[in-house]
Image (cartoon, rainbow, N blue to C red):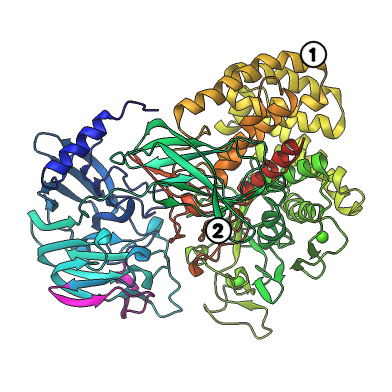
Amino acid sequence: MKRFPLFAAAALLLAACQSEAPDLKLNDLGYFERQGVNVLVFNNPFSGGFNDEKNSGIEVVHHGVRTIQGGAVRLSPTPEQWDLVPTMTSRTVDTLAQTIEVGMRYDWYDFDSRVIVQPKGKAVEISVYLDKPVPEALAGEAGFNIEFLPSQYWLKTYLVDGKPERFPRYAVSDTKVRPNEEKVRQFKGYRTYDDRGTGQFIEALPLSAGHEFLMAPDAPERMVKITSESEMKLYDGRMLAQNGWFVLRSVLPAGKTGKVLTWTVEPNAVPGWIREPNVGFSQMGYVPDQPKVAVIELDRKDKVQSKASVWKVEADGSEREAFSGPVKVWGEYYKYNYAKFDFSKLTEPGVYFLKYGDVRTGNFIIDPSVYDKITVATSDVWIPVHMNHMAVHEAYRLWHGEPFKEGYLQAPPSTDHFDLHWQGPTTDTKYKALELIPGLNVGGYFDAGDFDIETGSNISVVQNLITLWEQFRSERDETFVSEEQRYVELHRPDGVPDILQYIEHGVLNLVAQAEQIGHMAQTLSNSVLDNYHHLGDASGITDGLHYDPRLKPYQKSADGKSSGTPDDMWAFTSRNSGLDLQAATMFAAASRVLADRNPSLAQRALKQSIRLQEEGTKLMATDTTSRNRRRMNQGGNFSTALQLYVSTKDPKYLDQFTAAVWPALERMPMGAISAALDAVPYLDEAYKEKLRPYVEQYRDYILQLEEQNPYGVPIGLGNWAGGGQVTGFGTTVCNAHRHYPDIIGKEHIYKAPSWLFGCHPYHNYSWVAAVGAARPKQVFYGNNRADFSFIPGNMAPGLLFRQPDHFENYDDWPFLWGQNEGTIAGNVGYLIFGETFRNVEAN
Ligand SMILES: [Ca+2]
Ligand SMILES: [Ca+2]
Ligand SMILES: [Ca+2]
């Protein structure tokens, strides 16, 4: 993206050596900077989507790690994800005065404030201004907060007004309770907590209070001094939520206007600090004849070494240099400088590691078999662990018991949900609000790190599993699945290919939706926020008893079958004909695949397919929702038409496909090429020839990616990192190479796996849990994230971009979903990529 020579950096380095360490300066990107310290002021405003995502406000990137964020006027000592966040009403960067001013507003309370940040030598001064006093309802509640990353501060010391203390490893500070009426409003009026009938909420009490906090004097890279004339209190945000941070806070004075508070914040900069090079390579290793290129990410002030080497670990444990070669500068990309080291000439199988300057990497293998097992953790563990309505066992361990035994209630009309779902003004079903919809507690997959059944996602998952089965026929059998016992056991073969059982499990829930509701639900999800953020065993999310409003909350009926606790899950049933048509396509394919294995389910799927296809088509013609109109304007979904043709061999679907595919390729060649390639095996030579120029365009795109960034894969800059984009790219490149090897050379198929398994920015760990021989990532945002652990086979979204120039993936803090979560759709996407890649690679 940005490539220019390095003499500028060299000149800077020289200047740095000749003078005192420089002060913080406002840079061209609109943040305050000195070597080792970046102070960002609302470069990332609070998004409001899921509210406080611990990604916003005033932030500090400290020696390369974003350890401080959330600096803003907040309404609680330890804000949770669903607490209100301020809207940024203005942001003014004054390059002359060297200030950044941000306006913040809480609409609900009609409360405005401003913060002005200005460098003072090596510190920044942060001042809060009010034009009107704090509203009465927020007096004593509104304060200026800043948050510190627990995993970078726990077990380190701090001094408060000179008194030594230690940051606790685990949340064990004191709390108090207050009446619910005093609780500041949360997101859309929901509550994050279950008060167990007490009428009270919990508030954390401070760890310490004072006017000068010196954080981490024992760890210079994390040391920060904060002083203020206002009293500051330090809290442990984990007391209320496992994803909370350490919070430093001053309450805003009541009844005052003008400058009401000033803090001086001085993040230490270690003299002469230069970020350690991040040597990106594939942890999984390499097959002998593939290209092998390490991408080295470097501080701009670092001097690029001219050579790097590969060392071999011999059978007697000794080490010898096996290869050495030149390091070539690629150039700058966002914050860092990049260089490449090509060791493709090394082809002899063995155990190796890389040396670059003082950096010695972990070891990796060169061998023809390195890719053989890249999908087994995902197919044998991650997917079955996400099977809903089943108990899942593994050896001595229970992953989870049977969830949601009480089933699902009809969601009431006009519900605005916290997971961004909604129920329209009508139910579109025969059920009354909160009536039990029978038969939905069967089959299906948890969506992600949460436990809802996202229907669209489940449909695509089943469709993709069917494609996998039909393309590759993997007979792998490592999972015992009994729908009758509602029991899954990992690593116990039961004579049935697992993938067929996974298809069956998905279909069971989706067919039940079609039969019981009459069409596809949008989602089966939580009704109360305090069980949406559940962590751990899914069987404890609800009490398993039918909700009976005649009972008091927490009271059980005499027969033990119902309770007065309104925790039952809801079915969101607003009809979406697009979803019905998508399900119809999938049901047709499922009925074909399950015909031998489960004839009655196959029959039910076929029946629903035909009905939904008819009804959906009629509804689509009259449907005015923008989403469906968009589909119609595109001339229908050609990828669906292809699937229908493969299922039915009815030539009308082939006509639909060919009528839509060429205009789509003209309109969005990179978006349509993947589905167009999928059709090659089913169509004639003429089709393949006609597609050729688009494949040539695709090759140009692949080559242009190499100019765009040093890794040569599409790097996403969204709020959800781009791991899925990379597996999608990898699958498409493999298929393009398979059908057009003369246009797309084999060397390109290795880019996606290299990225996934460690050759990427920030660190060199594999994005796939438990996969990547020497060093997979250690923490993920799975439902076991409170244990700082992972569910094997999870592919993380990976590299999250923060404005204006920072890439990040925490490996000691699992709680940022945008970088560490895994979804059922994303992980099945990884399976597809893995199977496709292994098959193409082996040929
Ligand atoms: Ca979800
Ligand atoms: Ca099996
Ligand atoms: Ca219940």
Packing grade of label 2 (10 A; few <14, some 14-19, many >=20) is many
Q: Quadrant of residue 570?
A: bottom right
Name the amino acid type tagged 1: Ala
Disc 1 CB within 8 Å of nearest ligand 2 atom: no
Residue behind mark 1: 686
Classify 559 as above or below 255.
below
Classify 703 as above or below 841.
above
Closer to the camera, 176 or 608? 176
Would residue 399 appear left or right of 617 to someone viewing this image? left
Would residue 412 appear left or right of 402 to someone viewing this image? left
Q: Quadrant of the C terminus?
A: top right
Decide whether residue 182 is among the magenta residues: yes
Rendered location of residue 800, percent (x, y): 44, 45
Rendered location of residue 524, percent (x, y): 62, 56
Would residue 625 appear left or right of 387 to someone viewing this image? left
Q: Give the residue drawn at x 33%, y 63%.
A: 79
Name the amino acid type tagged 2: Gly
Closer to the camera, 728 or 271? 271
Would residue 257 appear left or right of 644 to someone viewing this image? left
The kind of secondary structure element at disc 1 is helix
Looking at the rendering, the quadrant in which ligand 2 lies is bottom right
Residue behind mark 2: 449
Classify 257 as above or below 297.
below
Magenta stretch in the rendered image: 160-183
